[in-house]
Amino acid sequence: MTYETVASVDQAVAEALEGERRRQNETLSMIASENHVSEAVMEAQSSELTNNYAEGYPGERYYAGCEYADEVEQLAIDRAKELWGADHVNVQPHSGSQANMAVYLAMLDPGDKILSLDLTHGGHLSHGHPANFAGKTYEVEQYKVDEETGYIDYEGLAAKAESFDPDIIVSGYSAYPREVEWERIQKAADSADAYHLADIAHITGLVAADVHASPVGVADFVTGSTHKTIRAGRGGIVMCDDEYADAIDNAVFPGAQGGPAMHNIAGKAVGFGEALSEDFQAYAEQTIANAQALADRLQEHGFTLVSGGTDNHLLLVDLRPSHPDTTGKTVESALESVGVVLNANTVPGETRSAFDPSGIRIGTPGVTTRGFTESTCREVADLIARIVDDPEDEETLSAVATRVDELTDEYTLYE
Ligand SMILES: *Cc1c(COP(=O)(O)O)cnc(C)c1O
């Protein structure tokens, strides 16, 4: 029992926590936005800093008692600056969405215009979906990927920037397997006299390790999440040049948030420290090599990948050409039942619904943390192919489940 103290006061929650620990240990998380942080990050996140009120910033708090909160937040900031090379970093956003909210609050007025990627093409809710505050507050127009190639339609984006005249262009995506050409988007922003927000939520770790081009120094604002390809625990960050530092800090607090989650900032500090190591460099490289091995093998099995492959940690399978009668949800459920956890996803030119779309998104950050390499990932591709070919065959399901058990036993996660 890991959660003994919780169990002594609350059996129900302790059992759920134990269950989740077991679930993560015994399944392969291939959800592209998920990862597994170290025990050190988790210990920092569960520290006494959860008790502090540290409204404000290091050295200028609204409350007493912030000596150690200041130390921790400054460490997180300094390490983030070293990782991403930004002039100014705010480590307080509770999530990536709130990091984006802070940029909008700082630079836009209600009714201003956002140009962002279509959600079904790999955009994010916080880029202006009608159900999100951004969609309710601002006028939104969307650019797309080229449905033939799967790559961002940079020319279409530039044309939209000219006709729509946005106040901000948002780049950075949730389901885009290719390297983003930040300069091309910056050029469109310059022509339209718009700000450029590069949201690197998915690739924060890849950019930190320099295995993906960085938008820092190109875009006006860079936001990220701290729990996807970097293992610093749940949260967000905003980076910008010094000229926007005060505007961003005021937008995060008091604009969008109250007191910072100092315990999570401690997790960020520890995770950022880990990411400055050579081990993390090797991890980021392996994450991409693994995604490419998986992509190649799936293509050998006859699957169609959006854009034909990947440059990063994720790939997007369009099931329609190879398996026209099989939906993303069917595959998601069948794979979950054998311990491979990933998500159904819309694909460019989607012909089904967002609830049961035509694709699946597969990511390698989690399995790479477990120690998977190219050969293990090729085997995972074989297992996925077997399930997609026959998602209801009991014998196949049971054989694959057995193999997933063996793999999770061999590549352990949490003790
Ligand atoms: C994951 C993600 C975010 C942040 O999401 P949160 O769940 O709010 O942390 C922001 N933008 C993009 C493109 C994402 O993929």
Image (cartoon, rainbow, N blue to C red):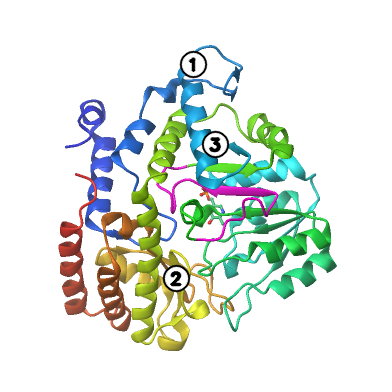
Q: Is residue 233 magenta?
A: yes
| For marks 2 and 1 on the same chain, the one whose residue lies earlier in the sequence | 1
Residue at figure coordinates x 47%, y 20% from the top left = 52
Identify residue type, mark 1: Glu
Q: Which mark is residue 91?
A: 3
Q: Position of residue 292 (x, y in %)?
A: 39, 72
Q: Residue furthest front?
A: 278
Q: Is residue 187 left or right of residue 373?
A: right
Which residues are drawn in magenta? 212-234
Task: Give the residue type that dot 2 points to.
Answer: Leu
Which of the two residues, 77 or 235, is positioned nearer the viewer here? 77
Q: Which is in the foreground here, disc 2 or disc 1?
A: 1
Distance from label 3 to label 2 (Cα)? 29 Å
Which element is circle 2 on? strand
Q: Amino acid at mark 3?
A: Val
Q: Earlier in the sequence, mark 1 or mark 3?
A: 1
Q: Which of the 4 image quadrants contains residue 382? A: bottom left
Q: Position of residue 283 (x, y in %)?
A: 35, 56
